[in-house]
Amino acid sequence: MIIDMQSSEVPRLNMSSWEIGESRYLPGMEIKKLGKEKFVVYIGPQHPGSGHMRIIIKVDGDVIVEADPDLGYVHRTMEKLSEGRAYIKIIPLVERMAILDACNATLPYVEAVEKLLGLEAPERAKYLRVALCEINRIASHLYGFGIFGVFLGHSTMYMWGFGDREILVELAEKLTGARLTHTYPIFGGVRRDAPQNFTDNLRKAIRYLRKRLEDYRRMFLDNPVIRKRLEGVGIVSKRAATDLGLVGPNLRASGVEYDVRAVEPYEAYDEFDFEIPVFEEGDSLARAWVRVEEIKQSLRILEQVADKLDKTKGQQIMHDRFWAKVPPLYKKVFEAEGRVKLMPLFAILRVPKGRAFARTEAGRGEITYYIESDGKDKPYRVRIVSPSYRNAIMFKYAIPGHRVADLPAIYGSFDYFPPEADR
Amino acid sequence: MMPAKFVHKKTPKIGVLSSIGKNASALVLGLKYFFEPNRFTLMYPREYIVLDKRYRGFIVLIKNKCIGCESCARVCPTGAMKMVKFEVPNPKNPEKKKIVKYPTINHQRCVYCGFCVDICPTEALYHVPVHDVVYFNLADMIQYVESFQKEPVSPTAAEGAVPVKYIFDPERGLVKVRIKEGEKQ
Ligand code: SF4
Ligand code: SF4
């Protein structure tokens, strides 16, 4: 087909219809006029931040008078899909909720099933789980920082956050064999042992990241331009945070002492010496600071994990029920490659009748699983409550009263992740 | 047992005067990284990473080892692995045919979770540390027994890109190093 360039109609925007009225569109932004100087602005759902969601705001001039978070654009029916799958197949499914926080998102599921099966992971497997959880937590915070930076027009922070996250992703790849969707914890233990030089690499990465956090402070947190945009913006009071049920760093930035790792230690968290930072102010700046302080503490945990891993070298990483009677080939593979081979019964694993509940502290807050089993090889019900879903309500209360220009600062500071909220 | 402690902190306050200093400090830091950048970008089509042996890449079948037990197809969470039946001559009775089953992989669906590799009782499946194979049509992505046994080749490696690997460094985080001839790990 030949197109006649002269005669063919080139669609042009009719600028006269771009008057404020029914038909003014900007990409991802639809505006409706309500009255003089009063508009409804639809922000999203084409990826306003780290995923698809929409905030519908009403503005008077450029002051936001009402904000309404509109979720569900990346809903993948994970809970329903889980009802028709064998237990093991659900792990790679729910992992896709928050791929940058995969271990934290799947661990409570694995723990809940382990509770029903009545088994507990061996010691070394617990340390390996904690190692990957903390690697994921730091990676998730750095990702959040990167997005936050680019929201505020600070592209240096974006590059640094994503660049330094690569180190953690690389560590996770060395441990599990995959960069993001690790599928690492499994009923009874973990799937792979740490490679030879893992703890050395981990220590090197910790030293580097400690140094980098100082750079972050100078470049981003103490930068007067950034501080002006964050200080006193999007304040969430202690009362509001508890009443609305916020979780994770957002809750701790409002002065509330709550962290699953402290109130109900899981895996090996009660063996490590670390602090949980709590900030009083509740503004966007405090939410940024609490994450930086948390990264420092995660590095502290990782340091202790590295020592523990060195001490428990060569120990079993799978529960006896799935490891005591394995054929010699399985043990040979484990010794040679550190890979745990699964018994064929994993594919049709029957879980005793019962209900189980488990929770962990993911990068963005508490994540909860409730599993009901009727004794078959598929769960009767899997209920997931993810941290971002619980934090999303805050947009309704933290945004009004601010100017439109403050919205990215507030949205970014909550580190909201739509795929995790929508499940 | 030493449960984690909560520690209350406050965001540091900065006054007008110190804010000038902080601004300058951020600029100086920016300049420092301008002159001494810490880059480790992979120049992808011209360079490629030589992945670890442990990397969960493409999956290859060793037909001789496969006993047709179906475990791999049963555990696959995405339905990428399916069993296909073949008729082969029965060695005992040449009149009759024998039916054997071999797995088939659909790379459109596979998420490289590695469950099939780990569950195979005879180690008939293994991962190759390759992740960048390109297919020109969707049908090629379904690999039956014949093509399933061939190890895929990374097109970047085949076209003579420079092999690199990343090593951890306490000063620079990750450092990209070129792998010399004959030094493949
Ligand atoms: S790697 Fe996972 S998704 Fe791919 S074929 Fe094997 S079990 Fe299925
Ligand atoms: S699990 Fe292994 S032996 Fe069994 S059918 Fe699959 S490839 Fe063959």
Image (spheres, helix red, strand yellow):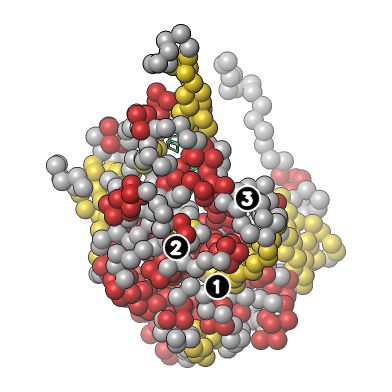
Give the label, 1 or 3, closer to the camera.
Answer: 3
**Residue A185 in view here:** no
The furthest residue to the top: B95
Q: Upstream in the sequence, badge 1 or badge 3?
A: 1
Q: Upstream in the sequence, badge 2 or badge 3?
A: 2
Q: Chain of mark 3?
A: A
Looking at the image, do the residues carrying marks 1 and 3 touch, with CB atoms under 8 Å apart? no
Q: For mark 1, what is the residue?
A: A361
Q: How many marks?
A: 3
Residue for point 40% across, 32% down: B66
Q: For mark 3, what is the residue?
A: A377
Q: Amino acid at mark 2?
A: His
Q: Horizontal and vertical percent for residue A213?
A: 38, 75
Work out whether residue B71 or residue A125 is closer to the camera in this orientation and state it.
B71
Residue for point 67% across, 81% down: A241
Q: Is residue A6 left or right of residue B128?
A: right
Looking at the image, do the residues carrying marks 2 and 1 touch, with CB atoms under 8 Å apart? no
Q: For mark 2, what is the residue?
A: A319
Image: A407 above or below B95? below
